[in-house]
Image (cartoon, rainbow, N blue to C red):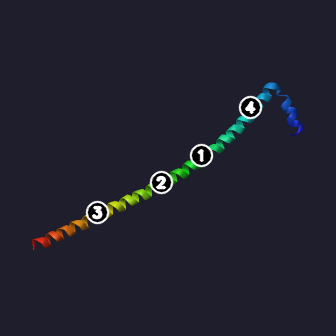
Amino acid sequence: MDAEFVKWFTTLGVGGVLAGLMFAFYRKDIKQYTELWKIMSEQMITTVKENTASNTRIISLLENLERNSIRKDDIQFMVDRRLQEMKNK
């Protein structure tokens, strides 16, 4: 600290010194909170991205499963119909 600052700081008195200390601790607390908030935000964004990717894969799997089950049913219907035709001949 330079001499001018110390001289000015002593003119504030006890109330000014206490207010300065409170402000310094407040700033430190806000900086810590801001950093914590940034970390939490990044974690939340990562979680949302992972969930979105997972949901997309699940939807794709369900669509493929539905498509394959329809094909299987169609094939089974065609085989059954063909077998029925062969029995009727």
Residue 40 shows which numbered tag? 1
Q: Earlier in the sequence, mark 3 or mark 1?
A: 1
Residue 70 shows which numbered tag? 3
Q: Most extreme residue toward the left, as rendered?
A: 89
Q: Disc 1 on helix, strand or loop?
A: helix
Q: Quadrant of the C terminus?
A: bottom left
Residue 22 shows which numbered tag? 4
Is 10 on the left or on the right of 26, as rendered?
right
Task: Give percent across and percent down for residue 10.
Answer: 86, 29
Amino acid type at mark 1: Met
Q: CA distance from mark 1 to mark 4?
A: 26 Å
Eyeballing the image, is 72 above or below 32? below
Q: Earlier in the sequence, mark 4 or mark 2?
A: 4
Q: Earlier in the sequence, mark 1 or mark 2?
A: 1
Q: Disc 2 on helix, strand or loop?
A: helix
Asked if the residues shown at circle 4 and circle 2 are in contact, with their CB atoms under 8 angstroms apart, the answer is no
* Residue identifier under label 2: 52
Q: Most extreme residue toward the front, as rendered?
A: 87
Q: CA distance from mark 2 to mark 3?
A: 27 Å
- The front one of 31 and 49 is 49
Q: CA distance from mark 3 to mark 1?
A: 45 Å
Is 12 on the left or on the right of 50, as rendered?
right
Asked if the residues shown at circle 1 and circle 2 are in contact, with their CB atoms under 8 angstroms apart, the answer is no
Q: Disc 4 on helix, strand or loop?
A: helix
Task: Give percent across and percent down for residue 17.
Answer: 80, 29
Asked if the residues shown at circle 2 and circle 3 are in contact, with their CB atoms under 8 angstroms apart, the answer is no
